Image (cartoon, rainbow, N blue to C red):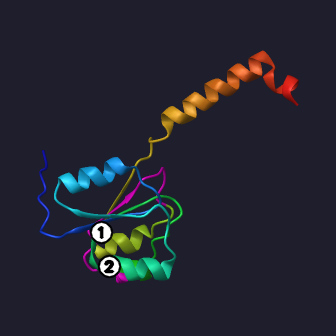
C-alpha cells in the first residue's frame, strides 16, 4: 500500500542498472519510470533531469550543484549504494531535495566473501593454486 500518491506523470529516472524491482515498485505506485543501464555524463544528465521527480543512482553518477539547478521538479535522490559521496549534499539540502542511500545493502555479500576467503586460507587453497 502506498502512502504517497504521485501527481500524474511524475517521472523517475533510474541509472546504472538499478534492479528492475525498483522500477516495478515505482510503476505500481503510479510513476512513469525511465531506466538506463549506464551512468550519464554531466551534460547528458542535465538534459534528462528537467522533469524528473525522483532520481536513482549508484556510485558512478555525480550529482553537482549545476545538475540540481537544472532539476526543478526533483524531490528525492536515492543512492542505491553504500555512500553518498557522489552527491553534493549541501546543495541538495538547500534545494529541498531528500537524499537517501542503502548503507547495509552489501552486508550479506561481504560476509559471504569473507567466510569463503577464510575457508580458502584455512585449507591453503591459495598456496596450491599459485
Query: SS class of the residue under badge 2?
Result: loop
Out of 108 and 44, give the one closest to the viewer: 44
The residue drawn where x is 62% and y is 24% is: 115
Task: Locate residue 71, reporting x and y percent.
Answer: 32, 79
Magenta-colored segment: predominant secondary structure: loop
Q: Are marks 2 and 1 in contact (CB under 8 Å)?
A: yes
From which residue to which does the magenta span run? 69-84
Q: Position of residue 39 (x, y in %)?
A: 50, 67
Rendering coords of residue 113 (x, y %): 61, 31
Residue at mark 2: 71
- Residue highlighted by disc 1: 97
Residue at position x 49%, y 36% in the image = 107
73 inside magenta stretch: yes
Q: Quadrant of the C terminus?
A: top right
Q: Residue at x 44, y 41 (%)?
A: 104
Foreground residue among 38 and 90: 38
Identify whether 60 is placed above or below 73: above
Amino acid at each position: 500500500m502506498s502512502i504517497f500518491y504521485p501527481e500524474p506523470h511524475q517521472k523517475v529516472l533510474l541509472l546504472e542498472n538499478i534492479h528492475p524491482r525498483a522500477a516495478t515498485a515505482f510503476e505500481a505506485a503510479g510513476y512513469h519510470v525511465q531506466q538506463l543501464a549506464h551512468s550519464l555524463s554531466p551534460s547528458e544528465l542535465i538534459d534528462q533531469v528537467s522533469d524528473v521527480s525522483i532520481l536513482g543512482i549508484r556510485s558512478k553518477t555525480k550529482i553537482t550543484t549545476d545538475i540540481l539547478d537544472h532539476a526543478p521538479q526533483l524531490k528525492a535522490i536515492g543512492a542505491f549504494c553504500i555512500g553518498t559521496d557522489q552527491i553534493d549534499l549541501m546543495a541538495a539540502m538547500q534545494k529541498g531535495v531528500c537524499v537517501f542511500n542503502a548503507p547495509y545493502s552489501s552486508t550479506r555479500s561481504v560476509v559471504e566473501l569473507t567466510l569463503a576467503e577464510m575457508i580458502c586460507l584455512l585449507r591453503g587453497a591459495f598456496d596450491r593454486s599459485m
